[in-house]
Image: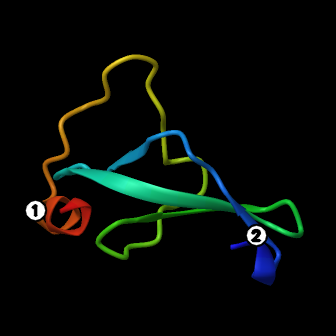
Amino acid sequence: MSDNGTRQITQPIYYDDGKVIHACKSAIMESGVRRVWTKCDMDVPDDQGFTIEGEGPAITCPECWAAIG
């Protein structure tokens, strides 16, 4: 990602949309803005992605599970 001015965040990030728990990807853009999106390609609203120390929550989104492979 360094070729387009972003840097990936490596800790596991999750998103609970009220229906299922998603696995997420995240990057900090060159401008310093953090962008988070689910592995099933949904944008995560600002400040809604979360991390957990230790064992994370069970991913319940079937599309995220398929993307994790």
Q: Amino acid at mark 2?
A: Thr
Q: Is residue 54 left or right of residue 3?
A: left
Discs 1/2, front: 2
For the residues marked 1 and 2, what is the alpha-carbon distance in whole angstroms?
A: 28 Å
Q: Residues within 10 Å of mark 1 (few under 14, many from 20)?
A: few
Q: Position of residue 12 (x, y in %)?
A: 45, 41
Sequence-wise first label, 1 or 2: 2
Residue identifier under label 2 = 6
Report the residue at 44% width, 25% height from top. Answer: 52
52 relative to 10, above or below:
above
Q: Residues within 10 Å of mark 2 (few under 14, many from 20)?
A: some
Q: Position of residue 6 (x, y in %)?
A: 76, 69
Relative depth, front residue between 8 and 21: 8
Report the residue at 56% width, 46% height from top. Answer: 10
- The secondary element bearing badge 1 is classed as helix
Residue identifier under label 1 = 62
